[in-house]
Amino acid sequence: MEHSTFKKWSAEFIGTFWLTFGGCGSAVLAAAFPELGIGFAGVALAFGLTVVTGAYALGPISGGHFNPAVSVGLVVGGRFRASELAGYVIAQVLGAIVAAGVLYLIATGRPGAELGGFATNGYGEHSPGKFNMVAALITEVVLTAIFLIVILGATAKRAAAGFGGLAIGLCLTLIHLISIPVTNTSVNPARSTGPALFGPSYAVSELWLFWVAPIAGAVIGALIYNVLLKDE
């Protein structure tokens, strides 16, 4: 059954809200307390789990993109109509902004709250490992390209039915394990935009990279898949 446009937008809003709130929330709320011991690995797993749970719950309605770069990549890959792109991107960005706002209210709800970077993305002095802009750009492009290849492969007709969401979530977990030290991991312009609006001022000034690089990577990944891996 074809779902209405509003239901698709609602699913993308909720899914991106969950990804941002769950993933960034684990970094802002849980990882801020070393005694809880979740660390980078726990944050990486949290992002992966949001995608797995969101994909199975909401994917049947909207396709479960939850990421403007993924939506663009799926257009290039021939899996998504370009006419629907703007509505999806707007819903995703709004979902991430609302999630960041809710997270901000919770995070500031204790005495002496220190938000730190508020799970924002950055490069240079604002990279967790002090990696420069070129390193951040390459990281985000390469990892988003691989992410799109995994998404297109895991959801192809020849793939094992019912396991796409799991493969995609595990891929996002691995992406975070690699790139948290470099950029604090974006591969998702919406996820970067929400926290940037509530975080330190530098986050907005560096936000351009976390739109340009993931979208460029998604386009590259979709082209690689179509040229080298797509079924005839």
Image (cartoon, grey):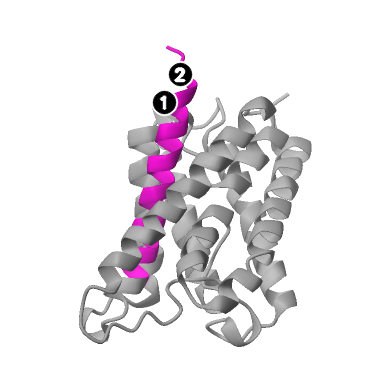
Name the residue carrying label 1: 7
Q: Please tell me which residue lies in front, 163 or 116.
A: 116
Give the class, few, some or many, for how many residues have Cα within 10 Å of label 1's Cα (few <14, many ≥20).
few
Figure disc tally: 2
Does residue 198 appear to the left or right of 34 in the view shown? Answer: right
Name the residue carrying label 2: 4
Q: Give x and y (percent) for residue 229.
A: 70, 37
Viewport quadrant of the N terminus: top left
Residue sitting farthest toward the right = 227
Amino acid on which disc 2 is placed: Ser
Q: Give x and y (percent) for residue 54.
A: 36, 42
Give the magenta-colored segment's residue range: 1-27
Viewport quadrant of the C terminus: top right
Can the viewer see residue 161?
no
Amino acid on which disc 1 is placed: Lys
Residue 162 sits in quarter: top left
Q: Give x and y (percent) for residue 94.
A: 48, 47
C-beta proximity under 8 Å, tags 1 and 2: yes
Q: Please tell me which residue lies in front, 185 or 96.
A: 96
Q: Is residue 4 magenta?
A: yes
